Every structure is written in structure tokens, then in C-alpha cells.
Amino acid sequence: MTVLPDDGLSLAAEFPDATHEQWQRLVEGVLRKSGKEVSGEAAEDALSTTLEDGLRTRPLYTARDGAPDPGLPGFAPYLRGGRPEGNTAGGWDVRQRHAALTDGAVLGDLENGVTSLWLVLGEGGIPVADLPRALDGVYLDLAPVVLDAGPDTEAAAAALLRLYEDKGVDPKAVRGNLGADPLGYQARTGTPQDLAPVAALAARCAEQYPGLRALTVDALPYHEAGGSAAQELGASLATGVAYLRELTGAGLTVEAACAQLEFRYAATADQFLTIAKLRAARRLWGRVAEVSGAPGAGAQVQHVVTSPVMMARRDPWVNMLRTTVATLAAGVGGADSVTVLPFDHALGLPDAFARRIARNTSTILVEESHLARVIDPAGGSWYVERLTDELAHAAWEFFRSVERDGGQAAVLRSGRLRTDLATTWAERSKKLAKRREPITGVSEFPLLSEKPVERVPAPQPPSGGLPRVRRDEAYEALRARSDAHLAATGARPRIFLATLGPAAAYTARSTFAANLFQAGGIEPVTGGAFEDSGATEAVLCSSDDLYAEQAAQAAESLRAAGARHVFLAGRPAAYAGVDSYVFAGCDAVDVLSATLDRMGVS
């Protein structure tokens, strides 16, 4: 048996402490080898990543990157969790979304891991009159129900409460949310709604149904319009504050008003930003409750949904990986309820297999990965704590700017919020177009031969307000042009990859070029002669040294063979006969769109 010394096992006792400056000097040496002459802080900046909202992720975090004391779970500022026990008792609430009546789908979910239901009713969903049929066979005293009914909220709430009464459910046993969100509906449609009926619903819930909430503060409209994490948080705070004012003005105490709200956020495949966003959201709402005079009522209840914006229509199977990472981030971030959108969500109504995979994602993370056993497992990470703090400050400033402009309803009416979100999305779209933000299976490693996944069309959601964007929309438009060409001619547009020299010289760039052009639905052809390829354009692929020797002659030969446009895979240079260049960081969408135009693919 090994006996430890009195001071423990000091494995690093014989090594001198390294300093941050020493590490920076090592970084300088590495960068110097790559041709970058930088030193000190500039060397560290060269390895940093710029995020939205003016945030910047550095390559190394240490104890000097401290953040304010996050407190303890269940206590202000609630950053580490709204409940002292977190999700350790049994994991988070697994909430499945249903926007259409599918035989056996609701009961099938509840019998196989789902613990609450999210029902979309009225416009773009299940008719309110069919609510009893949708919940037929459901034990309403066991399964919480969350409604999403837009302008039909009053009718849907009345139908649900009547159903509870008809089935003899004890009002104290009722759990869920009536889903009233007038400002969220205004964001979706541009149509203002009266807040007075919402206050009446909240008062009734507070008096008769202590476990039932009346309002949802849905931040998805701002996320789906292209907003950043700080904008999503800031808009949710402004909405929550507007509801607090309405409810307290109707006679509820601040504590009772806070207890009527549930917040809905998006979880993306950027796991650390999602974790920081959920932690920052709790801290920010805790601050709102504090300045409202109810510091003990600031425990934000969070319903987190995997991001619709990140869901791709091409190669949709990859969406399973995206939603897994997003669900992990939601769980680590402390979400109370999590909805995993099925991998075919962007294609239409999910089938039974897609719903099964969605609900099993949470089951695996909770039951097999034991993700819920530790409260706030990311807490204490210098990176996560610093990112949480910086994001909270950025979101608070956005919230304050909304309040200065008259509040959430005012910025929705004026169009100011639409403009802010559009500006953010325009900047992000540039990164997507240049593949700085890659989309696997779409802008990177697309599979042109994939068999399309077809689904029954889903009901059209409410529209007329903020737009709904998707990361894949620019590439989807290009692929749709290619599909139409295939249907009309029997073949996809093609491009010839003219490789120069041995495989070691051209493989990297020919692979790059093939991926790039396939992202636009253009089929790469390798081997053989250009005349036999069926292509009208070509791309030279090789090393810089071989380009210097052979590029001009190869371009001339391709033109003589009938090539109307010659690309070169590599950084722009002065090669005779080369029309344009494709390289890492080029505007892929612009290149592909122009190429399809020249090929006559409408």
C-alpha cells in the first residue's frame, strides 16, 4: 500500500511554475514558423476567435481570467441553477413537440421516455377543438402539458382547463404552461395582441392552479430571425419585463408574476456558447427580479429547444449529431426542460423513427452518460465563467437599449429590432458563404448522390413578422437549381478537375475543389480528357510549384479543348489563361451562383 506524504501527492512539486509570458513566447515561435511575426499579446490575439456581440474567445484561460462569484444552485444570482438539487433527481424534463395529430404519436412518446407535451394549437397546428382527442388516454395528472396557441390562447386554455375538470384532476396536481405570449406572436406575425386577457389567465393560475404557469417568454422568434445570443437574451429580458409590468399592474405581486413565466431559448451545436447563454440568462433574470424588489423570485425556469436554424434539409441525418451536441449543451447549461427537434424537422412532419431518435437523445445523455448527476458541471471552468460573464454584459446592454427605445412592443412596432437582427444575420451569412462557418453535408462534404428524404408537409407556421432564416438557405437555393437541371436534362451540371503532377501534389486541392463545387450541386469529373467529361468549365488542381511550371500551358490546352472558363484552386496569382480562383475563404456562394449562371442552370 502506498502511503501519501502529509502534504498529499504533489506531482508537480519538482517543476518550476510556468508563467503566461513564457507560454506566449512559445506561441510566438510557432507563429514565426508559419510566417507571422507577432509578439506578446498580439501572438495570443492571432490565435483568438471573434464571436458575435463583440465577444472574443482566447486560446488559453487561466485563474487571472476570473469572473464574479457565481453563487450556489438555488440561490441568487441563480447562475448555477434555479433549484438547489438541479436536475440530479431524474434528469431534465423531456418535452416533445406536436404540431399535428398523428395516430398514436402522443401516447407513443409518453410511453417511451417523454415526460411532458408541447402542443401547437390553432393557426399552424392542431385545431383547438381537437385538443381532447390529442390528449385522449393521457394521464393529465402525470404528464405536464404546454400549449402554444397564439391568438387562440384563451380558447385553448379554456379547453385544457375544462379537460382537467372533466377528468377530475386535482387543481394542485396540474402542471404545465398555458403558453400565452402576445409579444412573441407579435414578433412572428407583426400583429399586436392585447395583454389584458393574459393577466386574467395568470391571476386564475396563481389562485387556482399553483403548478400551472400562464405565460411563455419565447426567444425563438429572435433566434430564428438570425439574432445573436446576446440579442436573444436581451429580447427575452425585455419581453419578461413587459409581462411583469402587465401582471403587477393587474394586481399580482412581483413574486406571483415571476412564478407565471417560463423562458424558451434555443440550443445550438456551439456547445460552449449555449452553456454560457443559459447560465447568463438565469443571472440576468435574477438581476431583474432583484431590482423589481423580489430577489428570492428570480429563479428562471428554462425550456430549451434545439435550434431550428441549424437544421439542414440536405443530408438531414447529420442533424442527429447537431441535436445531440445541442442537447448536451442544454443539459450542462442547466435547462429545466429540453425539446429535441427530430432530424427531419426542416422537411415536414417527423416520422416515428425521427421522433424516437429525438426522445432517445435525452434518454442516452441522462441515463447512459449521466449528464444530470452533477449540477452545473461547467461551473468553475475559467473559459465558461468568463464567457458567461461577457455574454451577460452584452445581453444586458442590448436589453437596456430596447428599454430606452420604449420596450419590446415598441421596438417590434418601429422595426428597430428587425433591423438589428437583420444586420447580425447579414454578417453571419458572409461567414456561411465563405464557409468560415461550415455546414457538414451542405457546404462541406456534400453528397450529391444522396436519396432525398421526403416527408408529409407540416402545417405552415404563423408569418408576417420577423423572418425565419436557416443556415443552409443559400446553398439550398443552389442545390435546388441543380436538381431542376437534373430533372430537365437527366444530368447535373459538371466541372472537370484538371489535376497536374503526382497525386501527392494535387490531392489536397482536388479534394477541396470537389467539395466546393458539389456544395452548389455541380458534379466534379476527374480522369480522362476534358472533351469526354461533359463539362464546359474546368479547375486546375496542383501545388504552387507545379502551377508556376504548367498552369499557363494547361489552361491553354483546356481552352483549346472547349473550356469556356478555367478556375485555379489556390490563392489568386498572375497565371495566363486562368479566369478565376477558388481558395479557402473565397465567397463560395458567389462563385457557385456565377458558375451555374454561366452554365445556363436557371
Image (cartoon, grey):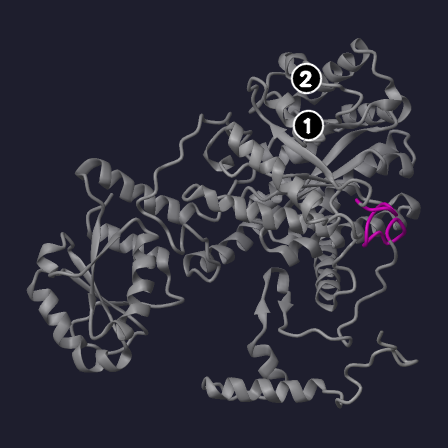
Q: Residue furthest front?
A: 1
Q: Position of residue 94 (x, y in %)?
A: 69, 36
Which segment did they paint magenta? Answer: 73-87
Residue 77 counted in the magenta span:
yes
Look at 65% across and 30% down and name the residue there: 192
**Does residue 404 appear in the picture of this structure?**
no
Instruction: Check disc 2: other Cα within 10 Å, few if <14, some if 14-19, many if 20+.
Output: some
Whether pointer 2 and pointer 1 mark residues with C-beta atoms closer than 8 Å, the reply is yes
* Circle 1 residue: 117
Q: Quadrant of the N terminus?
A: bottom right
**Does residue 62 appear in the picture of this structure?**
yes
Q: Residue furthest left?
A: 560
Q: Height in image: 144 above or below 439?
A: above
Query: For numbered disc 2, what is the local secondary structure?
Result: loop
Look at 78% across and 81% down and name the residue there: 11
Q: Position of residue 428 (x, y in %)?
A: 51, 56
Q: Nearer the viewer, residue 588 or 524?
A: 524
* Circle 2 residue: 135
Q: Height in image: 528 above or below 8?
A: above
Q: Nearer the viewer, residue 331 or 585?
A: 331
Q: Position of residue 320 (x, y in %)?
A: 53, 44
Q: Nearer the viewer, residue 356 or 157?
A: 356
Q: Is residue 375 left or right of residue 152?
A: right
User: Which callout, 2 or 1, points at the residue further toward the start of the chain?
Assistant: 1
Q: Height in image: 29 above or below 465?
A: below
